[in-house]
Image: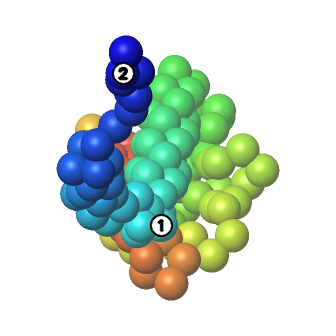
């Protein structure tokens, strides 16, 4: 009586290796350069915080002009952040904000111009 051996054939093993190679060739480039995505996401997060700070300041000044801070320029909004300043090496492109403005678009730039994002600012002079 013959004993039949079980296992994978050479062709099956080669096919599995080829499939793994193809999947790796497709997937690896997706994960290689995540730094640009991270910079963009961080800059959009700072822009969201700036927009929120401007809206809260606008609401406080609208309720009572003695509250909040007078904002004349987009660069003034950085001082409204918790801690009183933008994160290190971030900058805001200056643009005047009209009194009682309901919407003004400002631009925040990441360090070394890695990314930029637009945020909405409101102000009461």
Above or below: residue 125 compared with residue 59: below
Query: Which callout, 1 or 2, points to the residue nearer the camera?
Result: 2
What colouring method underlies this structural image? rainbow
> Which residue is at the front of the view, 100 or 118?
118
Report the residue that reaches farthest toward the top.
1
Disc 1 from disc 2: Cα separation:
60 Å
> Which residue is at the front of the view, 41 or 62?
41
Q: Give the labeled residue for mark 2.
A: 2
Report the residue that reaches farthest toward the right.
83
Report the residue that reaches farthest toward the bottom.
112
Above or below: residue 46 compared with residue 57: below
Q: Give the labeled residue for mark 1.
A: 35
Q: Earlier in the sequence, mark 1 or mark 2?
A: 2
* SS under mark 2: loop
Residue for point 64% across, 61% down: 86
In the picture provided, is 58 more to the left or to the right than 121?
Answer: right
């Amino acid at each position: 009586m013959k004993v039949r051996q079980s296992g994978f054939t050479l062709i099956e093993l080669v096919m599995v290796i080829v499939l793994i190679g193809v999947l790796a060739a497709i997937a690896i480039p997706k994960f290689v350069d995540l730094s640009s995505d991270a910079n963009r996401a961080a800059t959009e997060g700072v822009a969201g915080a700036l927009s929120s700070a401007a809206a809260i300041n606008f609401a406080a000044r609208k309720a009572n002009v003695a509250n909040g801070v007078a904002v004349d320029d987009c660069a003034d909004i950085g001082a409204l952040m918790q801690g009183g300043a933008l994160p290190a090496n971030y900058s805001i492109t200056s643009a005047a904000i009209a009194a009682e403005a309901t919407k003004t678009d400002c631009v925040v730039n990441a360090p070394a111009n890695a990314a930029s994002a637009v945020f909405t600012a409101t102000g009461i002079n």
